Image (cartoon, rainbow, N blue to C red):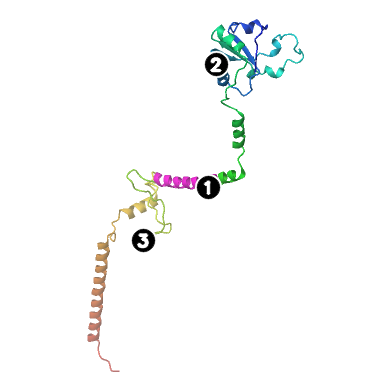
């Protein structure tokens, strides 16, 4: 790190931005020092009012005789290594110029230790990579199963009516209501479809639907079976009586 404690000639446009009696130009700063590091370093010696990074190329400064004019130390022209420090008072400027040694504060970022740790963290070993990949794949498969179950649950809930009943669009054969196509509870008309009322199929189904069901309830089926048995018994008795009458009225013919 170097500071200029001698008079130098700079462009007027540059010197107008900084007070000449309270400004010091510092160069050769470590490339990894940030503004906070620079402020903490010089604030231990003198009170700093403000600080500004400089993109000033060293070729615009006339150095004292003895410097190699062909080699302007171009690597110092990087604006990250040049800074203008504006101090509070002229006494603060004198303190910095009279100081023989300024101790650099610990860098908050990009120190050697932190760079080594960053290098190691960006290059994990194979066992860690294998373990991470295996756990990631397992978690992905579990997430896929959970998502599939959630979609199935949403589809079931979407078929629920407002009153809580579930629409059964098509199912297997069941009991007396079975037909060749299976059970179809929800018809097109129930689902909001349109039916041609003038069609013969609609009129036939309507007549069949309006007819009373004699065997819908269990007691109806039981009474019907009892009535059928009584009718068969009565018919059997009538046939039996006719047979007896025919036997009595039949004439005997020996030859």
| Closer mark to the observer between disc 2 and disc 1 | 2
Helix, strand, or loop for circle 3?
Answer: helix
How many C-alpha atoms fall within 10 Å of the one at disc 1: few (<14), some, or many (≥20)?
A: few
| Closer mark to the observer between disc 1 and disc 3 | 1
Q: What segment carries the magenta color?
A: 136-158
In which quadrant will I find the C terminus?
A: bottom left
Which mark, by number, is residue 138?
1
| Closer mark to the observer between disc 2 and disc 3 | 2
Any part of residue 175 in sight: yes
Which mark, by number, is residue 86?
none
The tag earlier along the polypeptide, 1 or 3, is 1
Residue 57 in picture, x, y percent from top left: 68, 14
Residue 95, picture quadrant: top right
Residue 174 in picture, x, y percent from top left: 38, 59
193 in magenta: no
Residue holding disc 2: 43
């Amino acid at each position: 790190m170097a500071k200029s404690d001698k008079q130098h000639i700079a462009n007027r446009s540059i010197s107008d931005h900084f007070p000449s009696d309270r400004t010091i130009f510092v160069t050769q700063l470590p490339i990894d020092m940030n503004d906070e590091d620079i402020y903490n370093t010089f604030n231990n010696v003198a009170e700093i009012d403000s600080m500004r990074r400089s993109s000033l190329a060293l070729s615009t400064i006339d150095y004292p005789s003895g410097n190699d004019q062909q080699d302007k130390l171009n690597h110092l022209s990087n604006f990250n290594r040049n800074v203008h420090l504006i101090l509070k008072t002229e006494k603060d400027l004198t303190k910095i110029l009279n100081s023989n040694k300024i101790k650099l504060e610990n860098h908050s970022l990009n120190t050697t230790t932190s760079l080594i740790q960053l290098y190691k963290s960006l290059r994990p070993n194979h066992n860690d990579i294998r373990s991470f990949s295996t756990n990631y794949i397992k978690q992905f498969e579990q997430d896929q199963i959970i998502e599939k179950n959630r979609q199935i649950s949403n589809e079931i809930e979407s078929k629920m009516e407002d009153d809580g009943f579930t629409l059964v669009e098509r199912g297997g054969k069941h009991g007396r209501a079975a037909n060749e196509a299976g059970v179809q509870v929800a018809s097109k008309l129930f689902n909001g479809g349109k039916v041609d009322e003038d069609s013969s199929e609609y009129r036939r189904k309507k007549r069949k639907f309006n007819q009373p069901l004699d065997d819908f309830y269990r007691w109806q089926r039981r009474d019907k079976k009892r009535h059928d048995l009584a009718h068969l018994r009565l018919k059997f008795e009538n046939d039996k009586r006719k047979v007896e009458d025919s036997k009595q009225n039949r004439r005997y013919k020996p030859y």
